[in-house]
Amino acid sequence: MASPSTRIDDGHDMDSVNSGLMREKLSVLVVDNDALVRKVHEKIVSKLKVAKQVQIQTATNGKEALDLHLSGSSFDIILMDMQMPIMDGTEATKELRAMGVESMIVGVTSADARADKEAFTEAGLDQCLAKPLTADKIKSLVETLEKNK
Amino acid sequence: MEVGQMQRRLVEFTKSLFVEGFLDGQFLQLQQLQDDSNPDFVVEVVSLFFQDSEKLLNDLTSALEQQDVDFKKVDAHVHQLKGSSSSIGAQRVKNACVVFRSFCEEQNLQECMRCLQLVKQEFYLAKNKFETLFTMEQQIVAAGGSIPATEITSF
């Protein structure tokens, strides 16, 4: 199994007029078993320049996400896929909340069944978004983060 | 063929892919993510889709050939294909997966097998269209031109 990857984007090349108001750091964990989805979501987050420094890590299933937290990592936003092997998003979310993780956990799913989505939300999500994510959806998550500071 | 003509052909071809439902807005999102730091992003992502999906389609074929078909396993594969096709904007592949999933839920083997054929058909059609698109782009770049940005308002 691939180990979680990390990438850091330095936002120093963005609009200097806004740089004073911009958040210093944003850390995001992308949890999805599909490499293509991880690649796209990672790219969307890194391109957004919503913070002076954007740190992105990826995990291929809920267990990897849990292991990251158990080893001391923490994140501002966790983008959690619902259906994954080994440990799915619903279980991983329950475990993270039981561990005391208070990060924003956003469910990302293409699931059609409302019952599945309800169970996922009840596991402790802050919100649930439809896959695929877009730049606007992620920007609005960061705005929510800022409002709740 | 001169560059301007190639660019116009590309714009018309891209427009046709949206009009015929092969592509949706998610493909435009992918194009917007491409920049000088990652100039081959779209090709990389689409290539990854075709590699992973070929394997998924093979897994689906063998799953449906089993004596006791595990419809949950079949559904999981279709779900993954639906997710990745929607991530690149391959709308017709995604829509075929939506129908497929409904028959997985009913555990209707005959309809599932029919859906698999439809998904494969849409997959290979999409692959063909993307290959044509990327070849046209490469020809423009080789001739010294730039790729015109896709404007959805022109459709």
Image (tube, grey):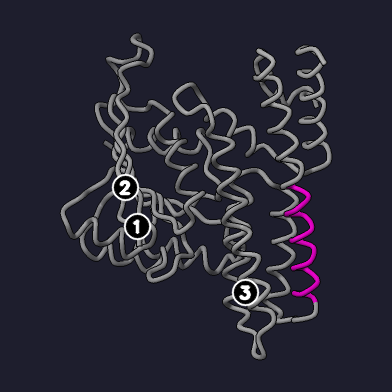
Amino acid found under the numbered disc labelled 2: Ser
Report the front residue among B29 and A137: B29
Badge 1 marks a residue whose secondary structure is: loop
Report the front residue among A26 and B53: B53
Amino acid found under the numbered disc labelled 1: Ala
Badge 3 marks a residue whose secondary structure is: helix
The residue at the far top in this view is A17
CA gap between label 2 and label 1 equals: 8 Å
From the image, which quarter does the N terminus of chain A lie in?
A: bottom left
Would you place residue B51 above or below residue B27 in this image? below
- Which class describes the residues within 10 Å of circle 3: few (<14), some (14-19), or many (20+)? many
**Tag 2 residue:** A5
Residue at point 31%, 38% (across, down): A7
Mark 1 vs mark 3: tell me if same chain: no
CA gap between label 1 and label 3 equals: 24 Å
The residue at the far bottom in this view is B67
Q: Main secondary structure of the magenta part?
A: helix
Query: Any magenta on residue B63?
Result: no
- Which class describes the residues within 10 Å of circle 1: few (<14), some (14-19), or many (20+)? few
Q: In which quarter of the image is residue B154?
A: top right
Q: Do the residues labelled 2 and 1 touch (CB within 8 Å)?
A: yes
Q: Which residues are the magenta region?
A: B111-126
Badge 2 marks a residue whose secondary structure is: loop
Q: Which mark is residue B74?
A: 3
Percent position of residue B112, x then y: 75, 74
Please report, as a chain letter, where disc 3 is located: B
Percent position of residue B32, x then y: 56, 28
Q: Which mark is residue A2?
A: 1
Residue at point 67%, 90% (across, down): B67
Amino acid found under the numbered disc labelled 3: Val
